[in-house]
Amino acid sequence: MQSRPVVIASYVLIAATLLLVMWQGLLPGLLCVCIGFLATRWLARVLENGVRRTLPTSSVRARAALAVPRGIAAALIMLAPIGLIAVAFSEARDFVLNAPSQYLELIDYIARTVLELRQKLPTEIAAYLPEGADEVQRVLANYLRTQAGALALTGRAWLGGLLFAYVGLIVGALAAIATPTSVGRPLAEELKLRITRFGEAFQQIVAAQFWIAAFNALLTALFLLFVLPMWDLALPYAPALITLTFVAGLVPIVGNLLCNTVITLVGLSVSPIAALVCLAFLILIHKAEYFINAKVVGSRTRMSVWELLAVMFVAEAVFGPAGLVAAPLFYAYLKKELQAAELV
């Protein structure tokens, strides 16, 4: 049992670190540290099991071979994002080459839609709408010019977030294969205990997010395959959209926003009414996400729905969308620490 000052110091260091993560926008990096650590450990175990099956466990050669899988696992985890980016760029080459013609088609479609609205709306309101494709392009150009600074800052923020995420992945992968150098030292042992409990909370949240993504994908499938066709508003690429909903739904909040944008744009390609119906459905799902998230996460982390909802609303009010993403994880960790101390 460690002395009380050492335990308090470990709590203060962890709390300060988590607050610093939220205030400095380092949440993507922290999440990727956890992902890199757990993914490397899992992949290393898989590779080690393969080595044990092929070599006698008592041989010197086997003991030496078991030291290799962790390094291989860390290298694979660190190189995986680079490989995915390379594949994405190779697949997107045709899209980039055809971008000018697709842009013109989009402008023409927007112009036709605006002209239809001009015919249906009162003259006083229709006068504020563009009259043709040239004016639509001029309006878009003026908007982009006035918002250039904001767009540049947004792009820089996204780039910084991706950089922090990748650095976090590398840190997590390296931490998974690192050899402890301060075993037995009081503060190091307490910090290791704090980090272990945080990792357990993260694993529980990831498992819960899987079921949330599956539930969202199910609702989206029912909406795209049954509800919209009943109204003669069937969307193209429905299977791909359902798959995107599940995969992106594994990322809390941000993944849902990505799916909402894509599905609404596809709905706009069918008709403005289809886009509005999709948008209304997705807003409803987004609001229901609070209760779905609280119910699933609460059942897996032994937290009541009301307390997790309260934490999520407060965290979003204080830290914005990042707080909504971090709230279940941080509160699950806090609950673990309180339960371990027999305070709750």
Image: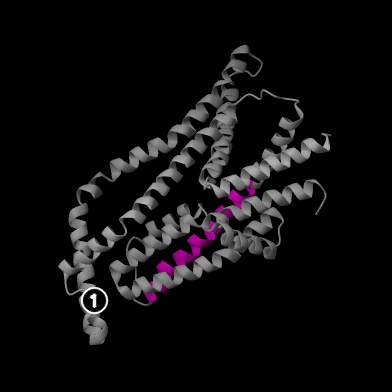
Could you tell me the amino acid type at mark 1?
A: Leu
Residue at far top of view: 60
Q: Position of residue 144 (x, y in %)?
A: 28, 59
Callout 1 secondary element: loop
The residue that mark 1 highlights is: 129
Q: Position of residue 242 (x, y in %)?
A: 42, 59
Instruction: Please give the name of the residue rendered at 16% of the width and 72% of the height, measured from the top-left corner.
Output: 132
Q: Is residue 325 left or right of residue 103?
A: right
Magenta segment boundaries in residue numbering? 202-230
Instruction: Please give the name of the residue rendered at 21% of the width and 73% of the height, measured from the top-left corner.
Output: 130
In the picture, residue 82 is in which quadrant?
top left
Q: Is residue 200 visible?
A: no
- Note whether 12 is above or below 292 in the view shown: above
Q: Is residue 27 left or right of residue 228?
A: right
Instruction: Please give the name of the residue rendered at 67% of the width and 22% of the height, measured from the top-left corner.
Output: 181
Q: Is residue 293 visible?
A: yes
In the picture, residue 312 is in which quadrant?
bottom right
Q: Nearer the viewer, residue 166 or 266?
A: 166
Q: Position of residue 114 (x, y in %)?
A: 23, 74
Q: Position of residue 94 (x, y in %)?
A: 23, 47
Q: Is residue 273 left or right of residue 110?
A: right
Chief SS of the magenta region: helix
Q: Nearer the viewer, residue 78 or 341?
A: 341
Q: Is the residue marked by circle 1 packed among few (<14), some (14-19), or many (20+) residues within 10 Å?
A: some
Q: Is residue 228 magenta?
A: yes
Instruction: Please give the name of the residue rendered at 18% of the width and 60% of the height, measured from the top-left corner.
Output: 104
Q: Image quadrant for the N terminus?
A: top right
Q: Is residue 149 left or right of residue 105?
A: right
- Note whether 146 is above or below 338 in the view shown: below
